[in-house]
Amino acid sequence: MNKKPVKNRRVTFTVQADPGSTVYLAGSFNDWNPQKKKMTDKKGNGTFTACLLLPPGSYEYKFVINGTWCVDPANCEWSQNDLGTLNSLLTIEV
């Protein structure tokens, strides 16, 4: 029996910040390295976005806005991490 390969899903992350801010996306999908995914504000209106292709699974993430780590205010799914702070949760279904 052949299994179909699991397809990666395109996920768009969005956060509001002051125009001109420096915004990164960090999470379990990029070893919590914010330098790996800079978010862009294409319209200059403070709406920062980043797109990733991710396989199905559960992921934790945060935004880093001007050096401050923040949970996703639009996502009410959170988990407490080992440091006692919260991470946003994302689940991608098969």
Image (cartoon, rainbow, N blue to C red):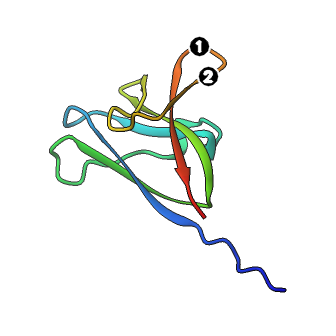
**Marks 2 and 1, how far apart at CA:** 5 Å
Quarter of the image where one finds residue 42: bottom left
Q: Secondary structure at mark 2?
A: loop
Q: Residues within 10 Å of mark 2 (few under 14, many from 20)?
A: few
Circle 1 Cα neighbour tier, 10 Å, few/some/many (<14 / 14–19 / ≥20)? few
Pick the front one: 36 or 82: 82
Q: Foreground residue, 51 or 3? A: 3
Give the labeled residue for mark 2. 81
Measuring 52% from the left and 37% from the top, which residue is drawn there? 61
Q: Amino acid at mark 1?
A: Gly
**Res 67 → quadrant:** top left
Horizontal placement of 61 versus 18: left or right?
A: right
Q: Residue furthest top?
A: 84
Q: Which residue is mark 1?
A: 84
Q: Of all residues shown, which one is farthest toward the bottom?
A: 1
Decide: is 8 above or below 29: below
Q: Residue furthest front?
A: 1
Horizontal side of residue 44 vs 54, given as left or right: left
Near-viewer residue (73 or 38):
73
Residue, x 32% and y 38% (percent of image)? 74
Which residue shows up at 61% across the image and 22% down it? Answer: 81
The residue lying toward the viewer, choosing from 92 and 68, is 92
Residue ID at (61%, 59%)? 56
Residue 33 in the image, given as x and y percentages of width and height: 58, 37
Up-down relation of residue 84 to residue 71 (above or below): above
* Position of residue 69 measured from the top left corner of the image (x, y, whole percent): 45, 24
Identify the image quadrant of the N terminus.
bottom right
Residue 77 locus on image (x, y percent) = 46, 35
Q: Are marks 2 and 1 in contact (CB under 8 Å)?
A: yes
Mark 2: which amino acid? Asn
Q: Say which element carries label 1.
A: loop
**Image position of 81 (left or right of 88):** right
